[in-house]
Image (cartoon, grey):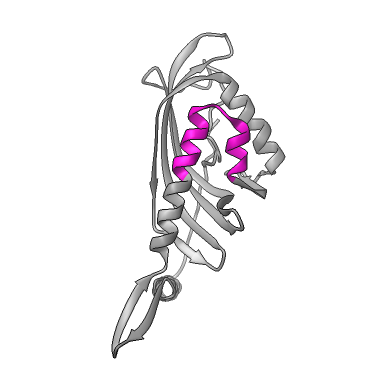
């Protein structure tokens, strides 16, 4: 069942103007914080702090994809922090234990993955945390409750946050899950006719 978030906003023009101004100011400040400037031989050199983090997170995703392809729930959870958690669109909090159980159930239903694609948006680095909106698409052959195997394509956009640990970057939390869609045998998923546990892994649905 899809969760829908309906936001109703009614503000005076002045309020909208102030809110927009604050948003732009916050964005400019955030972009400035992502860049570090140092002077060498009289020249200013600007470095984007998010670049090495992006490289590390892309490497994390390579490991995550391998773990899911192997259907290895232990390896999947090893890439997540001990306090890993997710928040669903309806506000429900899932603990690491919840997500570990969910991952095992999901992998038990999957025969094999056909493809796993992830598009990482702008990365916001704040201390030992890094977050980004990630657009996911996974295609797999999955067993339905009636025992038959079907092609399942799942898409979602979600905010993923990683934490830098002694073992490197690990997934810390997943939230702001939205724009989800499911196709079964290339046809839109109909909850009334097909009952199936289908989240794009995570919120991991996380891989997130």
Q: Assess whether residue 63 is covered by the magenta stretch.
A: yes
- The residue positioned 53% from the left and 67% from the top of the image is 126
Q: In the rendered image, which quarter contains the N terminus?
A: top right
Q: Nearer the viewer, residue 129 or 4?
A: 129
Determine the residue located farthest toward the front in the rendered image: 41
Which residue is at 65% across, 37% downward? 99
Determine if the magenta segment contains residue 60: no
Residue 96 showing in the rendered view: yes
Q: At 35% from the left edge and 86% from the top edge, which residue is drawn?
A: 39
* Magenta part, dominant SS: helix
Is 89 situated above or below 67? Answer: below
Place of residue 62 in the rendered image (x, y in percent of width and height, measured from the top left): 44, 41
Task: Give the extent of the magenta segment.
Answer: 61-79
Residue 15, position in %: x, y? 46, 73
Pinpoint residue 180: horizontal percent, then vertical percent: 46, 37
Vertical comparison of 81 with 109: above or below: below
Q: Position of residue 92 (x, y in %)?
A: 66, 44
């Amino acid at each position: 069942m899809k969760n829908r978030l309906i936001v109703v906003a009614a503000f005076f023009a002045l309020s909208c103007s102030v809110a927009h101004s604050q948003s732009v100011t916050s964005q400019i400040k955030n972009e400035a914080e992502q860049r570090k400037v140092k002077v060498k031989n009289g020249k200013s050199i600007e470095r984007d702090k998010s670049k090495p983090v992006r490289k590390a997170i892309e490497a994390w995703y390579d490991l995550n994809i391998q773990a899911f392809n192997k259907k290895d729930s232990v390896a999947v959870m090893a890439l997540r922090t001990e306090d890993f958690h997710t928040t669903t669109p309806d506000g429900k909090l899932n603990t690491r234990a919840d997500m570990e159980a969910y991952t095992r159930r999901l992998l038990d239903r999957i025969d094999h993955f056909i493809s796993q694609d992830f598009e990482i948006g702008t990365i916001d680095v704040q201390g030992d945390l890094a977050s980004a909106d990630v657009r996911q698409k996974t295609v797999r052959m999955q067993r339905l409750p009636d025992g038959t195997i079907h092609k399942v394509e799942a898409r979602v956009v979600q905010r993923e946050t990683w934490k830098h640990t002694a073992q490197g970057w690990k997934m810390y939390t997943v939230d702001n899950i939205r724009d989800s869609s499911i196709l079964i045998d290339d046809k839109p998923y109909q909850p009334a006719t097909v009952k199936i546990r289908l989240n794009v892994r995570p919120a991991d649905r996380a891989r997130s």
